[in-house]
């Protein structure tokens, strides 16, 4: 099952490779990672998606908390959070097909950001499943290449947060 | 508590500027550092030049950087203070990797200071450049690259705080040569700001209540104590709690000494080469009170059959250790001493007479015995006799393998911080340098290194260090001419096919070798010589003394849980078959 974690950390020397190294060193799977500035005092937020059950997410969360620079880890459950991904998709085109491609982009609420003689580049945002679907639909025209940001996510208003250790599922 | 040394370095007054190297030495003194284990090199010359004028900081010149890391580790385990390592860039730094990993696995506080090439040269494949922060990232608790002289003091303060608090561990500080040369203003000592690092002290009271309730219903309780008891300074309260509960105590290898082995409630070490009764007690217990231990595979054996009847209480400072291997019914995160104190307040004495009687019967029927394969000395016999002669107050550093397990089984540890051994990483060559660190941490205390002919040769160059600093370490060299533990596995699981474990053909003459270092050497071949030889060695107070015991070549460490077996499936020595006893 896909799980999304928000990780706040102090972006000091070597902090990012410590986080990524944890995933390779402990063999935790990673689906996507999106990293950006979260506040002015050097705090960075990573949105990370992984595949696994509760016990894996608990292990990941505990291990992340061991890192000195990690400030907070929150799981964003899909029902209670908004999640978006940005993708740029470069589709093979010709003057005869341009119109069709633009229309298809419209269907996915995409925007054409570059139109050349041989390709059209479409900007798409949405959940990962929508981006997958769009790329599928563009593929008959020929997808030359695409670049995806990985998911970023925020908790919805009033949704319960599952913070750090409180996620631990322990009997008694 | 850290002792504050009086700084001999330039006085701290506002507006004074100093070089990065001077600020580094000042910051170390501010942390109460009295001893540094180091080896100079190109990029460290500035720092060594400051040390030249700082006699208050005792620099110990090792003979290999791996020795520096293990010595600092031994110093830390024996004293409870952080061990400090100072090595040059490139090979100097990479030589400390094994020692850093050893300390990381066993949660030992180290601060490793590595020289680095000039900031502008980093990434240029400069002479003696290595990305040591990258290399050690998975084996350090934290690491730093100092980018300006102004950051030196705060970085050092933060590094010591991180290394010594929470679950302790090694912290590395990489020091570019230009940063050590540049000048910055001397600052008053200040703790860094670490919003992501708040190790928990007190346990959660409702969890402690829950643990007390679980214990109150126990018929067959067992306390399972690990190295965390020792690093938290919780041995005394552990003893009081065990006595109040009438609960027997088993310890891990690193937990030896956390509970006196001569106490009637002690069952000794559990695990692969643990006592039969310790393992069997855990298999039968109904409540397992785990303190500062992490259910290592060498402890549990086959997991689904480890403590199958037990409700598990797990006290640990590191939340990541709890329910990692064995699910805890009552997890309690925090400092072992605080939590045991709180628990001791609320528990009521248990009636465990029937349980303890059962354990006593098992203990009598299943002592840890092994059988020598030939008429030579029996290694466990040597360990027992040396222990009896040297006394329980000494600090013992071991190597890894049979010598380590025989020591763990037969020495009889009664005080915390008296056994120094590489448990997690299993680092051969650890013993001698760790003993050097302990000898410097505990002047006046007897330090023994139990080693084998394999492990001794991995860091025997440090004999020069021990001679240089006139350290009266007693080295007990159990010479069986084999890599004994590996040979034991070949014996038991590979049909006695001793592939590349026989060292005898190439072993040096240890007597002349040791004497060439200026240390004292004596060889012992028979049981009746042991006492006298130890007696003579103990008279030497100004240099190391190596007692080489020629021991049975193929004596196996018994009892033993074969890899992957349950702890109830222990092999025991068959003394009636082929045993020379």
Image (cartoon, coloured by chain):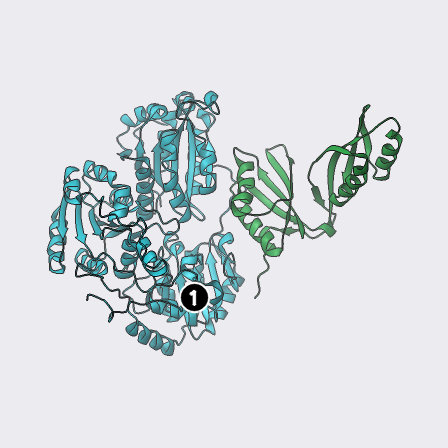
Chain colours: A green, B cyan
Which structural element holds mark 1?
A: loop
Q: Quadrant of residue B573?
A: bottom left
- Depth order, front residue of A106/B293: A106
- Depth order, front residue of A154/B133: B133
In percent of width and height, residue B476 lies at: 21, 51
Question: Residue lying farthest bottom?
Answer: B354
Query: Circle 1 marks a residue in which chain?
Result: B
Q: Looking at the image, can residue B446 be seen? A: no
Q: In the figure, B371 relative to B162: above or below? A: below
Please tell me how many numbered marks the rendered image carries. 1
- Depth order, front residue of B351/B329: B329
Which residue has dot 1 on it?
Answer: B566
Tell me if mark 1 has few (under 14), some (14-19) or many (20+) residues whose alpha carbon lies within 10 angstroms of its own. many
Q: Quadrant of residue B164?
A: top left
In percent of width and height, residue B384 lies at: 21, 60
In percent of width and height, residue A129 lies at: 75, 45
Q: Quadrant of residue A97?
A: top right
């Amino acid at each position: 099952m896909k799980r999304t974690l928000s990780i706040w950390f102090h972006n000091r020397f070597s902090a990012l490779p410590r986080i990524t190294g944890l995933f390779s060193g402990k063999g935790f799977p990673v689906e996507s990672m999106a990293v950006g500035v979260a506040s002015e005092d050097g705090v960075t937020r990573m949105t990370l998606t992984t595949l696994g059950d509760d016990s894996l997410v608990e292990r990941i969360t505990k291990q992340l908390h061991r890192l000195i620079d990690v400030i907070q880890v929150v799981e964003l459950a899909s029902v209670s959070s908004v999640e978006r991904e940005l993708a740029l998709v470069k589709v093979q085109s010709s003057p005869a097909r341009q119109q069709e491609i633009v229309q298809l982009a419209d269907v996915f609420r995409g925007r054409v950001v570059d139109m050349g003689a041989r390709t059209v580049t479409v900007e798409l945002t949405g959940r990962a499943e929508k981006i997958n679907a769009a790329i599928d639909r563009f593929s008959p025209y020929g997808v030359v290449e695409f670049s995806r940001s990985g998911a970023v996510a925020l908790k919805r208003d009033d949704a319960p947060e599952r913070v750090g250790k409180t996620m631990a599922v322990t009997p008694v | 508590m850290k002792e504050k040394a009086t700084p001999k370095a330039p006085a701290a007054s506002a507006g004074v500027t100093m070089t990065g190297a001077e600020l580094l030495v000042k910051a170390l003194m501010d942390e109460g550092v009295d001893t540094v284990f180091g080896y100079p090199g190109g990029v460290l010359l500035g720092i060594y030049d400051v040390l030249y004028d700082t006699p208050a900081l005792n620099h110990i010149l090792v003979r290999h950087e791996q020795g520096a890391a293990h010595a600092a580790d031994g110093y830390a385990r024996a004293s409870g203070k952080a061990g400090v390592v100072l090595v040059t860039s490139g090979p100097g730094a990479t030589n400390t990797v094994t020692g850093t990993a050893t300390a990381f696995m066993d949660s030992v506080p180290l601060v490793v200071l590595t020289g680095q090439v000039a900031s502008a040269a980093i990434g240029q494949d400069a002479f003696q450049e290595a990305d040591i922060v990258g290399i050690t990232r998975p084996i350090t608790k934290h690491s730093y690259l100092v980018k300006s002289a102004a950051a030196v003091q705060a970085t050092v303060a933060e590094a010591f705080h991180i290394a010594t608090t929470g679950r302790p561990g090694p912290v590395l500080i990489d020091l570019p040569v230009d940063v050590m040369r540049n000048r910055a203003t001397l600052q008053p000592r200040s703790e860094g700001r670490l919003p992501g690092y708040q190790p928990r002290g007190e346990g959660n009271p409702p969890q402690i209540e829950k643990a007390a309730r679980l214990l109150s219903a126990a018929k067959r309780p067992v306390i399972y104590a690990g190295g965390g008891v020792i690093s938290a300074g919780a041995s005394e309260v552990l003893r009081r709690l065990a006595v109040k509960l009438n609960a027997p105590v088993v310890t891990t290898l690193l937990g030896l000494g956390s509970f006196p082995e001569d106490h009637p409630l002690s069952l000794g070490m559990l695990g692969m080469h643990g006592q039969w009764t310790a393992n069997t007690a855990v298999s039968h217990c109904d409540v397992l009170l785990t303190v500062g231990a992490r259910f290592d595979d060498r402890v549990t054996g086959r997991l689904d059959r480890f403590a199958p009847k037990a409700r598990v209480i797990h006290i640990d400072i590191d939340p990541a250790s709890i329910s990692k291997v064995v699910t805890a019914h009552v997890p309690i995160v925090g400092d072992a001493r605080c939590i045991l104190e709180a628990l001791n307040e609320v528990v009521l004495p248990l009636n465990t007479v029937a349980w303890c009687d059962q354990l006593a019967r098992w203990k009598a029927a299943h002592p840890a015995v092994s059988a020598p394969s030939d008429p030579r000395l029996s290694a466990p016999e040597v360990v027992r006799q040396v222990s009896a002669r040297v006394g329980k107050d000494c600090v013992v550093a071991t190597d890894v393998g049979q010598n380590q397990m025989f020591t763990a089984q037969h020495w009889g540890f009664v005080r915390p911080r008296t056994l120094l051994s590489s448990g997690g990483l299993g680092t051969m060559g650890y013993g001698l340098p760790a003993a050097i660190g302990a000898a410097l941490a505990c002047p006046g205390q007897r330090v023994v290194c139990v080693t084998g002919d394999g492990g001794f040769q991995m860091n025997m160059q440090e004999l020069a260090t021990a001679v240089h600093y006139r350290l009266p370490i007693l080295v007990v060299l159990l010479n069986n001419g084999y890599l004994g533990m590996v040979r034991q596995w070949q014996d038991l699981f590979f049909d006695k096919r001793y592939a590349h474990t026989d060292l005898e053909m190439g072993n040096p003459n240890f007597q002349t070798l040791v004497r060439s270092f200026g240390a004292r050497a004596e060889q012992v071949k028979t049981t009746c010589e042991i006492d006298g030889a130890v007696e003579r060695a103990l008279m030497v107070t100004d240099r190391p003394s190596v007692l080489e015991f020629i021991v049975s070549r193929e004596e196996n460490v018994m009892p033993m849980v074969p890899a992957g077996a349950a702890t109830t499936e222990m092999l025991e020595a068959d003394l009636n078959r082929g045993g020379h006893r």
